[in-house]
Image: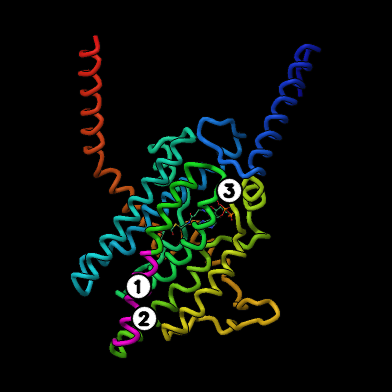
Amino acid sequence: MYTQSLSLDQEKKLAADTAEEQSREAAFQARIDAGDYIEPKDWMPAHYRKTLVRQISQHAHSEIVGMLPEGNWITRAPSLKRKAILLAKVQDEGGHGLYLYAAAETLGTSRDQMLDALHTGKAKYSSIFNYPTLTWADVGVIGWLVDGAAIMNQVPLCRCSYGPYARAMIRVCREESFHQRQGYESLLVMMQSGTEAQKAMVQDAVNRWWWPSIMMFGPHDSDSLHSEQSMRWGIKRISNDELRQKFVDATVEQANVLGVTLPDPDMKWNEARGHYDFGRIDWDEFWRVVGGDGPCNRERLATRVKAWDDGEWVREAALAHTHKQQQQQTKEAA
Ligand code: 3HC
């Protein structure tokens, strides 16, 4: 293979550029280690930027796709009170998606690019949203387990080294607490004053949502592609397995109060560890769902693509209006 040899000057310039890049990266890492927030206009390694666009955009996709499973029950809520609560929650999730898309845009990507990546299957969203919501109890269990897991994973992100992401998370976490509490409360009502059939409906929902909920935290640390670098950069503050363990420890006690059984015969308190031991996660199922072959992947993505296509006229009208306003302002300024 022909390799063009560099002239002496070119070699010197390359060495100087490399040395400059290395010193910038060292200064950047020192800022992270000192607990600085990195802001959009700050210098950052290209890989740091790329990692954040990947994670924040996929987080945003999760919020938007996450509206679908519960949205399915808004017209069938058992009372006006439950309908109003569910409407508020699903609307919150849409708002979380918008905060996060806006945070990702500060890194130089665009809404269109992010949504194209989602619609073409290039970008992921959380595996949990590829499971069906078969009964009303699923709505309560999603609030309790899915939003509960999301809070566990999102609270540390309030200290993420990237400023816009951390600030978006502060507001998201406040609203997630309401999401988790409303779900748990609706289950408590059914378990404490519901019929036997309603109690059985709650237990059935717990059986179906428990394992997919603990999969939300991602693969084991030893199998995680990004954890080591993301922790060095202060993007990920606590590892996948540690957060999963925190979630299990907190949720077992809540399940006892609720009077439901978690579908894991290996779940038992380990005094020596000071944590609950739990059974093996089915990683084949996890990677199958992440890979697009879960119970609802195709339906979820088709729904999002249809919403994007159906909304084209709204985007065109909004852009035409903005364009007209800009023309008007230019004319007035002239
Ligand atoms: N679903 C889908 N993909 C997952 C996943 C899951 N549950 N867990 C991990 N993955 C993917 C990762 O995205 C990565 O793939 P990629 O390189 O194509 O992006 C791969 O599996 C390897 O996993 P890693 O652990 O190495 O990846 P991360 O370091 O990114 O950690 C994460 C994964 C913990 C999910 C992290 O991305 C994160 O904290 N994201 C922000 C929080 C988030 O997205 N939560 C999802 C739910 S949002 C929600 O629940 C909304 C609530 O209102 C209901």
Alpha-carbon distance for marks 3 and 1? 31 Å
Q: Which residue is found at the position 56% from the left and 38% from the top?
A: 38
**What kind of residue is marked 1?**
Gly
Q: Is residue 140 above or below residue 92?
A: below
User: Does the magenta segment cover residue 276?
Assistant: no
Q: Quadrant of the N terminus?
A: top right
Q: Residues within 10 Å of mark 1 (few under 14, many from 20)?
A: many
Residue 169 as seen in the image, left or right of residue 65? right
Find the residue positioned furthest to the right.
8
At 61% from the left and 65% from the top, the residue drawn is 242
Q: Quadrant of the C terminus?
A: top left
Highlighted magenta segment, given as a residue range: 178-193
Circle 2: element type: helix
Q: Secondary structure at mark 3?
A: loop
The structure residue drawn at horizontal position 46% and vertical position 35%, both measured from the top left corner, is 106
Residue 25 screen position, x and y as percent: 68, 34
- In this figure, which residue is indicated by the disc labeled 2? 202
Q: At 49% from the left edge and 35% from the top edge, which residue is drawn?
A: 107
Mark seen at residue 235:
3
Q: Are marks 3 and 1 in contact (CB under 8 Å)?
A: no
Q: Which residue is at the far left? A: 80
Q: Are marks 1 and 2 in contact (CB under 8 Å)?
A: yes
**Helix, strand or loop status at disc 1:** helix
Q: Amino acid at mark 2?
A: Val
Please tell me which of labels 3 and 2 falls first in the chain.
2
Sequence order check, earlier mark of 1 and 2: 1
302 to the left or right of 74: right
Pointer 3: residues within 10 angstroms few (<14), some, or many (20+)? many
Q: Which residue is mark 1?
A: 140
